[in-house]
Image: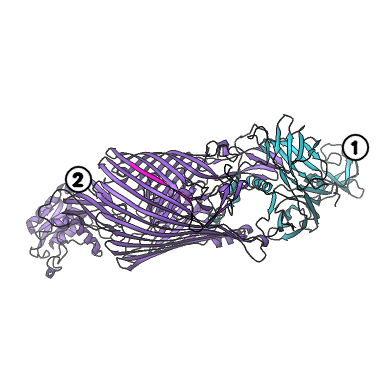
Amino acid sequence: MKIFLPLLFLTCFLLTSQSSQAQNLTGQKISIRLDSARFDEFVKQVEAQSGYYFYYDPSRFDSLTLDLNVKDLSLREILDQVFKGSEFEYSIDLQKRIYITEGQKIITQLIPGLFNPDRLGESDSIVYAGPESDIKEKLLSSAESKLHEIGIRKHRITPGNSTITGYVRNAVTGEPVIGAAVFITSPSIGVTTDALGLYALTIPRGKQIIHIKSTGMRETQRQIVLYSDGKLDIEMRESVIALKEVSVKAGMDKNVVGTQMGTVKLTIKNLKQVPTVFGETDLLRTVLTLPGIKSVGENSTGLNVRGGSVDQNLIQYNDAVIYNPSHLFGFFSAFNPDVLRDVELYKSTIPSKFGGRLASVLDINSRDGNKKKFVASGGIGLVTGRLTLEGPLIKDKTSFLLGGRSTYSNWVIKALDNPNYNKSSASFYDVNLHLSHEINEKNSLFLTGYISDDRFKLYGDTLYAYQNQLGSIKWKHTFNSRLYGVLTAAHTKYQYAMEAQGLPLNSFDLKFDINQSNFKADLSYNLHPKHTLDFGLSTIYYKLHPGSFKPRGAESLIIPDELEAEQATESAIYLEDKFEVNPRLSITAGIRYSFFQYLGPKTVNTYLPGFPIDYIYQEGVQEYKSGKKIKTYGGPEYRASVRYSVFDNLSLKVSYNTLRQYIHLLTNTMTVSPTDIWKLSDTFIKPQIGDQLSVGLYRNFRGNKIEVSLEGYYKNINNFLDYKGGDSLIMNHNIEAAVLNTKAKAYGVEFMIKKMTGKLNGWLGYTYARTLLRAVDRDSPDAPNDGNFYPSNYDKPHDFTLISNYRFSHRFSLSFNFTYSTGRPYTPPIGKYMIDGSQRVYYADRNQFRIPDYYRTDLAMNIEGNHKIKKLAHSSWTLAVYNLLGRKNPTSVYFQTVGGRVSGYQLSIFGQPIPTITYNFRF
Amino acid sequence: MKYSFLKFGFLALMLLVDSCIQPFSPPEVNSDENYLVVDGFLNVSGNDTSRIELRRTQNVNEAAGPTIERGAKLTAEEEGGEVFNFTESRPGVYVLPPRVYNVSGKYRIRIRTSNAQEYLSEFVAVSQTPPIDSLTYKVDNFQKAVIFYVNTHDPQNKTQFYRWKFDETWEYQAPYYSALELVNDTVVVRKENINKCWGRQNSGSILLGSTVRLSSDIIKDLPLNTVPISTNKLYIKYSILVRQYGLSRQAFEYWTDLAKTTQGTGSLFDPLPSQVTGNIKNTADPKDLVFGYFSASTEQTKRLTVMPKLGIFPRCVEQDTIPIKCPPRDDYECAGNTAKMLLTYYGFRSDSVLVAPQSCADCRLEGGNTIRPSFW
């Protein structure tokens, strides 16, 4: 590729040389004879004979000696001979000047014919040759050098501020650049682009230089003269094509400057560097390496964020909720890495626009398809394969992105020798379709469709299947330079089914599904340079079919049973103000009011007043007609955060949140299983309410290359659900009698060092966290541990994670992970007794002991193909070893009565090093 | 190599890699309490003896046998009716002779232990057990085992919850017949046949069934016991006695919970262990745990005896020949000093004997005994 020539030369030589006479350098003949002469001697002789004048740095030549014996050669021939094979370059301009430089030639003329097309190509001086194959490059460069006039032109610029708005886009794909910093340096004012690449920057009028920076993009700038409010769209180029390192200078930084706390954004590039067990980039598993996020076991992608349970995370894919984000028992996450752009996780400051879950928001965004050309990409791993197609439907306006992924695991299972596995099968696939369309400058439309499907059958008699289906449509509208809004409508369906056919008499079909339709409007108004208002409303309609149980086959004697459908609406309005009090202090304060209605038709059980809710105290039932309100819950949720810059690059942040959750996952197993049921709040099951206070210190070092953060939090959760021992949750007509209201408290400290740029990048996190639960009714016989606090299943106090990646070259990088965590709590048996001829055990208080600590190291190697832009396919290989040291980390310990004796066992899932190889391609 | 990686990956995926399950010995965790264990039920059939055993819980790592609770006073009480006294027939075993019960009544048990604690159960209704219709079996060539099934039904659709226990008995042989034994340093003909034995084993796990989701109260082909052919139990003759009990819903839940927490817990998708106690409480201290569930029911039994001739004749090392008469030197093996079993005379003058290790000729070493069962 052509070396990128700084623009400087273009401007320096703009006003010279074009009117000079053409000279024929080959005409003049020179003869020189030198023996071990110094370079200045050579210069002197040439200058004397030719009339040319040399420009060079004598200090570079003082140790150089020359032997030269030439006769009647042209100047160019002599210079060629002298500098051939050396690192020096020369160039000659039309004013008879010779410039000698090291490494790079000096451009002495613009592209021939730029100003006078008639005289094309008659000069042989060094001309500026832009990357001619890439006209875009030139245009971008000129966009940088051009002075942009914004607003209505005036002769006198009145002092004061005006607002510039516009989109920041990727020059190659046309995709919006999200989270790009757009700022001026004096005074220091900056903003970041939103999810559509839009920015609104309010700065003093007059001449300004706007800088635009974003990770993975080449830094750029625009010179502007700002007269009044106006528009400026900016195109950026990806930095990956520049083999020379782009230096990233200190500048705006979100970590220190924003009021956001506990927010982590990972781009697909970060995700791809983290080795995973089956070699495929896994979003949820990477999120699990961040401080404060835990899971019960190695196989589980259920996230426990700051002591929250798995159902307390709002997982959104392009604004549609995903109920089960995993494939194959949780070994894979349900997101195809090829279509992802980034994921943003909020764990302490949750913006007012989000609600409905207590612990966190995981906002996953897909890429937009390439708006300029068709691209196919994909990968082949050991158990999965994936393919993505993208391209423009209308060039620069409409694009599509279609991705598919599937597993070819069935043949592997079939190939196993063990007959037990032969009867088993497991398969999954997912398909994504994303369309983006730019109607005009003020309106864009996005459509997303997603479907994932899983089926597995163990030992050949029961088939489990589950599906996620979702669709969303998003319309982004800019009303004016200060107000813009996004309207979203989405529908999500999650369902599972079990088909049991072991015994013909007992064969059954079990089905469960949940449907949710939601609509929301989010608006942002730039009220004042110091105030930005975010406001909006949302509403969700839920319809759940909690279970249908039907006979399967003619012989089956199963009585059909169906639990009544449940329906409810959940609505919310919110208002949030971001107030920049002064450069040191900024406050974000928001209020969200959420409102939930549990609706008929439904038959609700009634219980004897004053007695515990248990089926033995059931009094009768009460019928509600369609649309009738059965139970209403609602309340305000407060969201506030404050940032104070103690001094440069060090800030203190405090945030307080309250949240409400009206839909719950009922599970009584250690790991969330796909067949757990979701339940809406009803007459008996109250909404979960949580509040969290966080305090954090943020400091950036080495010009913002290294981000260090320390956060502490304390959280209360009310009406957390736990389960009475042994009650079945499936097809339970008295589900309210099976749950136990619990109070939870969680607290912890999280420390993180992050470096996302440079050859060595990655993060290091340490968390100390506790999560404790206690039954609300402390005197109930069902209350675990006599009604005292006990650790939750995912209470792992110490957690240390190192994720690192070292890039040896642009084509080869090495990733290394290390994870340590305290073992999970378990409940050991403390006594045994004989009953009915065999030995049984009884257990200690819940979760008072811990399984052995967990540690694991992984290593991965990424090998990229060459970096030629023009070639058929770009490919890369990933070789990885998961659990390099082969430590048998126990996932669970358990005790069984086998042959009348009590024995303890530990189960480790990935107890050996697991090597994988994946091939990725793009063309 | 790549193929084996694939295989490994999937084995791991299936969570079933044998090497991934290792023994785990928990740190010494012990309970100082010795809680009361009540094992048994009130047999209301009118012609069977009711039997309740009282024991105490032990530490998990306790090697000694179960601690027996002696000297307690047990009474079964009918709601608003009679009181029946149990007597201690053997230490810790309390019995009540057969008598006529009111099967529509409710019963509870009262236990007064020797340390002056009183325990009382809830009142339970009588569960009538329908008879077992049939026992069947099938050879499963895939699992290489024989599976025994139970069939029953309640025409009144009232039972709905069932529990089973079974006793297995099988005949087996030692590979070699020992016809001789050494009595007072003399080789004589063995009186007892120790080549043929009967092995016995009881069901260790909790076997439950429910028809509550079915339109009629029918249990059909419910697998109760799987006997792998490799156990050789099926080589000569095998008999299974199945005991069936009807349960109340609460009793069924108790046994289900007990089974779940002590048999199933372990897989990642199994419920977490929880404390399972029954329907018996200390009248003075509700926090005192009592294990066991008191129920009143009848018992139905059925026996199936089969001779599927599956398995192989047991094999052993080759027989050895040693002289009967011991030479003067001690270190020479002879009938008088061998630890092996004497099988039969050998040689033209019968001056030698054939010998084999004990385990080849004494079937009792495999756990059975030589007492022929009455039903054989």
Return the residue at label 1. B184
Q: Colour of chain B?
A: cyan
Q: Residues within 10 Å of mark 1 (few under 14, many from 20)?
A: few
Task: Please provide percent x and percent y for residue A239.
Answer: 30, 55
When the figure is inspected, residue A623 is found, relative to residue B280, above or below; the finding is below
Residue A891 drawn in magenta = no
Q: Between residue A784 and residue A195, name the one nearer to us.
A: A784
Residue at the limit of the structure toward the bottom, as seen here: A118
The amino acid type of the residue labelled 1 equals Asn
Return the residue at label 2. A186
Seen in the image, is B167 located left or right of residue A373?
A: right
Report, in whole angstroms, how far the alpha carbon at label 2 lies from the one at label 1: 115 Å
Task: Please provide percent x and percent y for residue B342.
Answer: 85, 45
Q: Residues within 10 Å of mark 2 (few under 14, many from 20)?
A: few
Seen in the image, is B343 located left or right of residue A243?
A: right
Q: Between residue A842 and residue A567, name the one nearer to us.
A: A567
Which region of the structure is painted magenta?
A622-641
Q: Between residue B59 and residue B330, name the one nearer to us.
A: B59
